[in-house]
């Protein structure tokens, strides 16, 4: 989660939200959240699990 | 019930004592979605206020403000972590309980930094972005 926050704090282009899946089950179901952390970029589920900073950046920028 | 254990509270006080700039926890309350089963009778909004006010007590530069149904929030409760009170797009939607409280604490620490804590090459890569990017990270408290 902190990597996403760091990206948002480093760039005005980026926003980052943690979403508590149990409190928003409808949204979690729509985005097929079966494992956490699930990373969703621009509304599209991308991957599950934590990755190192360089890989995180590579993946979100590839989705941009 | 205390927000943190004594040792954890001491650590968070130390972190918050080193913030380089003020950080506001802007709590947005409003109509809540029916949570998944097992949530019991938790008043998520009231708990969110308790958590954020509790964190604000741990650092002179950390403040908490609460509003009902402010504009720009899709889900309630939510907390926007705002350096100098400015919305920079850092949020936690839902109650940050269990070990996820660490995510909110970490968000405050990051927002209180004067410089990004990403590696320089990561910052440079983000500077190349030519459009907005929305990151949502689904989490659970356990």
Image (tube, rainbow, N blue to C red):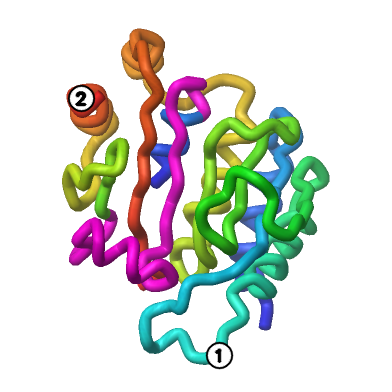
Q: Do we see residue A58 in this rendering?
A: yes
Whether residues under marks 1 and 2 lie with C-beta atoms below 8 angstroms apart, the answer is: no
- Name the secondary structure under disc 1: loop
Q: Residue at x 18, y 24 (%)?
A: A62
Q: Taking B69 as reference, is B41 left or right?
A: left
- Whether residue B18 appears in magenta in the rendering, the answer is no
Location of residue A25 by image quarter: bottom left
For residue A54, side relative to residue B117 (left or right)? left
Looking at the rendered image, the disc whose residue lies closer to the viewer, 1 or 2, is: 1
Chain name for mark 1: B
Side of A52 relative to A22 (left or right): left
| Relative height, residue A4 to residue B92 (above, below) | above
Tell me the residue at 44%/39% (across/down).
Answer: A16
Residue A14 rendering spot, x and y as whole percentages: 43, 28
Question: Residue at label 2?
Answer: A58
Numbered tag placed on residue B41 in the rendering: 1
């Amino acid at each position: 989660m902190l990597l996403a926050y760091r990206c948002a704090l480093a760039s005005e282009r980026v926003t980052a939200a943690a979403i508590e899946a149990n409190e928003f089950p409808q949204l979690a179901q729509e985005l097929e959240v079966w494992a956490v952390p699930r990373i969703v970029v621009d509304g599209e589920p991308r991957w599950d699990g934590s990755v190192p900073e360089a890989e995180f950046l590579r993946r979100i920028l590839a989705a941009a | 019930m205390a927000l943190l254990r004594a040792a954890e509270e001491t650590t968070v006080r130390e972190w918050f004592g080193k913030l380089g700039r003020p950080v506001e926890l802007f709590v947005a309350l409003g109509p809540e979605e029916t949570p998944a089963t097992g949530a019991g009778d938790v008043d998520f909004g009231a708990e969110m206020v308790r958590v954020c006010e509790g964190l604000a007590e741990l650092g002179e530069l950390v403040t908490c403000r609460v509003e009902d149904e402010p504009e720009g929030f899709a889900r309630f409760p939510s907390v926007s972590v705002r350096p100098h009170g400015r919305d920079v797009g850092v949020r936690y939607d839902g109650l940050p309980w269990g070990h996820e409280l660490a995510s909110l604490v970490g968000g405050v620490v990051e927002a209180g930094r004067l410089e990004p804590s990403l590696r320089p090459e990561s910052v440079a890569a983000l500077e190349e972005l030519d459009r907005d990017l929305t990151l949502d990270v689904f989490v659970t408290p356990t």
